[in-house]
Image (cartoon, coloured by chain):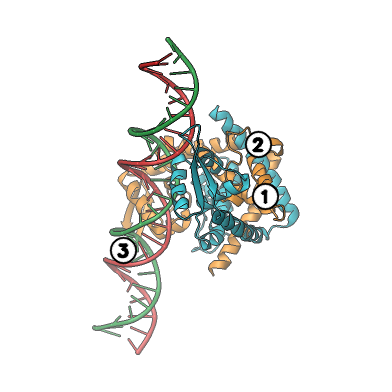
Chain colours: A orange, B cyan, C red, D green
DNA sequence: GATATTTGATTTACAGGTAAAACACTTGTT
DNA sequence: AACAAGTGTTTTACCTGTAAATCAAATATC
């Protein structure tokens, strides 16, 4: 959350709400425009809101996960195994969950100790490991997922159906651009 | 990033791109639907994309900030001081930047050592401190902000103007809902 | 006016992440 | 076959954030 991204909750809880403009990002943008009338604050209206929404959504979604004793990152890893339906190597898991290899190593250690995943060494290439869900792991993911989706559905229920579709489509467009752009930078 | 949020980059960079459906979240959602055809995966299309966009945007935006030797959180704090235009207490800064008081304390320590902010004690209530930007701090923020906005503008340039406006409006609606909902939960 | 409660800020202990180095193994080169 | 280079994973050192405990000072209660 950068200042230009909205700087979090804008006016804060303490000083009387968001004012006439709507959400807290609008209030932050107004502040910036007052200080720097020459700058184009347009990008903040999108990027600030995306970041703020992400922060609030993650906070809200933590509830069902934490109840199951999992961090978001851990569930992400288990979910990758569940949805692909096959074993993955640590490296693949890192790419799949968009985190570093070192982080995956740590998580695997914990999840293995908890009996949620199992490892087996590759027979041909002895550097690589293959990770799969245990029965308990699969059951845990399948147990949490419906709750999780129901929770997300409830969180979004303030926006009506057609608007949700529009939003999904626009975000898909943006995300496609961003992913293409990043891939281009990588190459 | 939860598995239901899209589990990061979906198929990863390694296995041949995103397929016919568009972005990586679409690929992840397809995987989930194949495994659990009974579940409503609708929320993922929004929440997953928001989280993924936020992750990619933050990564991209780190560049101009890091060049200036600031973390996002630090810039956020400085920005809050700059845009409000007056001193803030540590507690206000915590609310303003949506982070914990302890985190603010640490950041203030570092930023003070670097000469970017100054503290002064309140005369009436000696528990509270008042924090303000130094001249160097103000100059730094004002120097970075235009770069930052230009960078954000470039990052969004793949989406045309009208769509950006739609997106901003829809996100504002969602954010308003989320913020109201959270406030309701708090109360 | 003494004592309990609340409030603002900091400290402590710890969990989790990363980058860079190290390790173990494989693959390409001569 | 030996050796250089590359690849997959783990280890190390470190940094940042948080929750909970602590400290200091104000306010409320009796």
Q: Residue furthest right?
A: B162
Q: Tell me where residue B155 appears, x and y as whole percent.
A: 63, 60
Q: Is A155 displayed left or right of A138 in the figure?
A: right
C30 above or below A83? Answer: below
Q: Chain of mark 1?
A: A
Q: Chain of mark 3?
A: A
Q: Between disc 2 and disc 1, whose residue precedes? A: 2
Neighbor class of circle 2 (other Cα within 10 Å; few <14, some 14-19, many 20+) is many
Q: Between disc 1 and disc 3, whose residue precedes? A: 1
Same subunit: marks 2 and 1: yes
Of residues B156 and A162, which is closer to you in this image?
B156
Image depth: mark 2 or mark 1 in front: 1
Q: Is residue A57 visible?
A: no
Q: Tell me where residue B29 appears, x and y as whole percent.
A: 56, 49
Q: Circle 2 is placed at which residue position?
A: A18
Q: Is D10 displayed left or right of B33 in the figure?
A: left
The disc label shown at residue A123, or none = 3
Determine the CA span between mark 1 and mark 3: 64 Å
Q: Is residue A37 visible?
A: yes
Neighbor class of circle 3 (other Cα within 10 Å; few <14, some 14-19, many 20+) is few
Q: Between disc 3 and disc 2, whose residue precedes? A: 2
């Amino acid at each position: 959350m950068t200042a230009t991204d909205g700087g979090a909750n804008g006016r804060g809880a303490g000083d009387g709400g968001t004012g006439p403009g709507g959400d807290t990002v609008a209030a932050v943008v107004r502040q910036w425009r007052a200080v720097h009338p020459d700058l184009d604050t347009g990008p903040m209206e999108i990027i600030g809101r995306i970041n703020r929404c992400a922060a609030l959504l993650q906070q809200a979604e933590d509830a069902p996960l934490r109840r199951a004793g999992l961090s978001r990152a851990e569930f992400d890893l288990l979910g990758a195994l569940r949805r692909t339906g096959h074993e993955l190597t640590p490296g693949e898991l890192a790419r799949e969950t968009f985190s570093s290899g070192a982080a995956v190593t740590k998580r695997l250690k914990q999840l293995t100790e908890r009996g949620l995943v199992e490892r087996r060494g590759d027979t041909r290439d002895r550097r690589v490991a293959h990770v799969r869900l245990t029965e308990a792991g699969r059951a845990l993911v399948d147990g949490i997922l419906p709750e999780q989706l129901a929770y997300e559905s409830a969180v979004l229920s303030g926006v009506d159906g057609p608007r949700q579709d529009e939003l999904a489509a626009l975000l898909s467009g943006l995300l496609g651009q961003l992913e293409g752009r990043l891939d281009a930078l990588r190459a």
